[in-house]
Amino acid sequence: MIELINVSKRFVDNVVLDGVSLQVQEGETVALLGPSGVGKSVTLKTINGLLRPDTGDVIVDGLHVQRLKRKELAELRSKIGYVFQYGALFDSMTVAENIRLGITDETCYDDAQYCVNRVQECLRLVNLALDVTDKYPAELSGGMKKRVGIARAIAGKPKYLLYDEPTSGLDPVNADVIDGLIERLRDELGVTSVVVSHDVRGSFRVADRVALLWQAKIRAVGPPDQILASKDPAVQQFLERDLEMTLIQAESQEGREARGRNV
Amino acid sequence: MANRAELTLDPLRLVARSSLRSLDHVGRFSFLVVDLLRGLAEWRIWVSRTLEQAVAVGYGSLFIVLLVAGFAGAVTSLQTGYQFTGTLPLYYAGAVISESMILELGPVLTALILAGRIGARYAAELGTMRVTEQIDALESLGRSPVSHLLLPRVLAGLLVVPALTMFANATGIVVGYMVAKGSLGLTYGDFEYGARYFFRPLDLWYSLVKSYCFAAAVTLIPCYIGFNTQQGAEGVGRATTTAVVSASVAILLLDALTTRLLLVAK
Ligand SMILES: Nc1ncnc2c1ncn2[C@@H]1O[C@H](COP(=O)(O)OP(=O)(O)O)[C@@H](O)[C@H]1O
Ligand SMILES: [Mg+2]
């Protein structure tokens, strides 16, 4: 279980989180929505201890993240996969080496054959061709980098997964593949996930519950249909704006397809 | 209005703020050094990476270090000839060239060049990794950035800088001798006699100790600065220049300090 209790975080005089509480049950997928710059990434980083909240508690797998010693924190982190918003691939390493570093179990990591197989398996899961293994991150497109980042995060078979905008910047086909992957990891392996997104449609599809982060607080949290039916003006405003975006995207998508047909 | 308050040139406040900031750096730098010492236990991680780094920075720097050392030897030789001809016996040139290379020019020039080459490289690499969240990514995998990134770089520097210093010493002396032979007509016998006459085996150790101190400055300072980079590409640029400047100043301070402690105090 992932539990944020009254977490506050500020950078100098920029209050990013102000008393945020959120529970993610074992095996549950929670989507964390919110406009950009609201503190979604900051929230995710407090969960695996990359950022330290000023006040409040973060409890993951029954452990108080802030109170852990270095070794214990490293051990906990090896159970938490983290998908970075901009990939954060190690650019001096090939794709295969990147994903291999994601294999957090040391005996597995030292088993070369296991690693080769696992790397290929993870690449397949994120719908990447196997010929990217020997490429460097600089040779990949943005969407490919993102998917390698996801492959690296799942390589260690984590119990928890934190996705920071896993589908932003992906084409619709691959966004669907990733949404499907998130669902499968939950259904088949019981992975507990937090999916940060500002893509309402995709996250409503994968999430058991949705939380809206708005002006440093959790404004609403509940199952997708409950959020959709919410009368809260802030929630409505956020959803509306996003649905507009979706419409625009859908139109341009149709336009592209129409053009494609003409060719 | 808060900005106005910060801009006032209240000297007390300025001094207080900057000394707090430097205390903060001293504290965090010490923590980094402690972390590095602790990271030594994870040798399985750093051994291979250290060798990679050492090859990368060592080979790359060899040419420029030898070039500079050769010129330093040549100029020392010419200058010795210019100053001493007629007043002192010729074999003195052998002593001046070899001693000034070993005691001062070899270690200091090598370290200053490497502050530019290794220091800038380390600060830029680590700074980029910081601002692109690669360091966070490593931590998120439960892996320690200290043993994966910092320790290999520091240890590689500790291997490479003293080795390059010894090559620089040798090159400077050989080139210095050849120039002296050409310009002063110094024979090899005289040169060797002079070099041996004033040489103490301790001098080589001294050169080595100096270069280890410099190696620490060339690696630790840029690693610390790069590791703590903030704010995007501009931050990386700032980290790189700060690292080179700080490492160079540290080298000069350490030079004065080691000379005072090891040579003068006897
Ligand atoms: N390391 C940091 N230092 C200072 N400010 C930060 C830092 N990380 C994030 N912030 C600030 O926190 C706020 C929330 O950022 P973030 O969590 O990245 O937003 P998003 O919801 O788009 O992911 C932003 O205003 C950002 O400027
Ligand atoms: Mg973000």
Image (spheres, coloured by chain):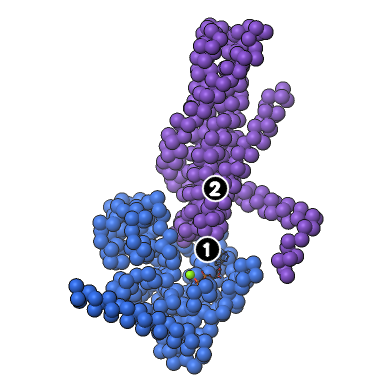
Chain colours: A blue, B purple
Question: Tag 1: residue type?
Answer: Leu
The quadrant in which residue A192 appears is bottom left
Q: Nearer the viewer, residue B16 or B55?
A: B16
Is the C-beta of the residue carrying label 2 under 8 Å from the nearest atom of ligand 1? Answer: no
Q: Where A152 sits versus B44, above or below?
A: below
- Image vertical order of residue B178 relative to residue A176, above or below: above
Q: Which residue is mark 2?
A: B240
Vertical relation: A77 (above or below) B257 = below
Chain letter belonging to callout 1: A
The chain that hosts pointer 2 is: B
Please report contact status of discs 1 and 2: CB closer than 8 Å, yes or no.
Answer: no
Residue A74 visible to the viewer: no
Q: Secondary structure at mark 2?
A: helix
> Between residues A106 and B24, which one lies in front from this camera angle?
B24
Camera sees residue A219: yes
The Cα atoms of the two marked residues, 1 and 2, are separated by 24 Å
Q: Residues within 10 Å of mark 1 (few under 14, many from 20)?
A: some
Residue B75 placement (x, y as % from top left): 56, 21
**Dot 1: element:** loop
Residue visible at 47% across and 91% down in the picture? A230
Q: Read off the residue under disc 1.
A: A50
Badge nearest the viewer, 1 or 2:
2
Look at the picture and state if A215 lies above or below B241: below
**Labels 1 and 2 share a subunit:** no
Viewer-closest of A38 and B220: A38
Residue B50: mark in rendering:
none
Residue type pointed to by label 2 = Thr
> Residue A71: image x %, image y %?
52, 57
Q: Tell me if A99 is positioned left or right of B229 in this view.
A: left
Residue A217, horizontal then vertical, whole percent: 56, 80
Where residue B104 sits: x, y (%)? 61, 26
